[in-house]
Image (cartoon, rainbow, N blue to C red):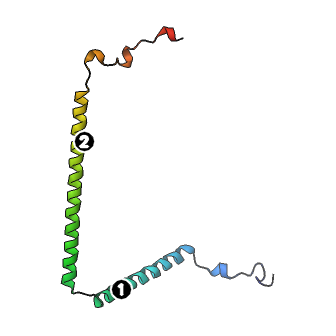
Amino acid sequence: MSYAGPKGSNTRTATRPSSTSTDWEQLAVFGAGLAVGLAVGAGIALLAAPQPGWQTRSDISRFTRNKRRALQRRSRDAWLDLRDELREASRSLRRTRRPVSERPLPPSELRPDNDDR
């Protein structure tokens, strides 16, 4: 046991802080590093931008406007398709409606057949 020392003299466990405070400290360090990284990245992006800011904003605005219009067209087409399918289904149900004499009896009016036993 020369590599670990005597059994009762481990001082690291007695002075070690609780794991929850260490977790919060690590989370704070990670958050600070993330914030600094975002700030440095944004600064570099502004300095290395290939076009002026007004042009970039215009491009983003045009892109979102086009995507919004395309989405509106697709959703309108989907609703119109659904409406047409429902109308066709109701027409086909009306065409296949049977007279009352040909309709099957409800389960409450059916009588069991005694010959099946």
* Residue found at the very far bottom of the displayed protein: 47
For image coordinates 42% across by 83% down, the residue present is: 32
What crowding class fits label 1: few (fewer than 14 Cα within 10 Å), some (14-19), or many (20 or more)?
Answer: few
Which quadrant, please, contains the C terminus?
top right
**Which label sits on residue 41?**
1
**Which label sits on residue 85?**
2
Q: To which quarter of the image does residue 106 belong?
A: top left
Give the secondary structure at mark 1: helix
Return the x and y of residue 50 as percentages of the image width and height. Answer: 26, 87
Give the secondary structure at mark 2: helix
**In the figure, 76 relative to 51: above or below?**
above
Near-viewer residue (9 or 90)? 90
Amino acid type, callout 1: Gly
Return the x and y of residue 3 as percentages of the image width and height. Answer: 77, 84
For image coordinates 21% across by 84% down, the residue present is: 53
Near-viewer residue (112 or 5)? 112
Amino acid type, callout 2: Glu
What crowding class fits label 2: few (fewer than 14 Cα within 10 Å), some (14-19), or many (20 or more)?
Answer: few
How far apart are labels 1 and 2 at the CA level? 52 Å
Q: Is residue 38 left or right of residue 97?
A: right
Near-viewer residue (6 or 33)? 33
**In the figure, 115 relative to 51: above or below?**
above
Foreground label between 1 and 2: 2
For image coordinates 21% across by 77% down, the residue present is: 59
For image coordinates 20% across by 53% down, the residue present is: 76
**Mark toward the start of the polypeptide (1 vs 2):** 1
Near-viewer residue (49 or 116)? 116
Return the x and y of residue 97 as percentages of the image width and height. Answer: 25, 25
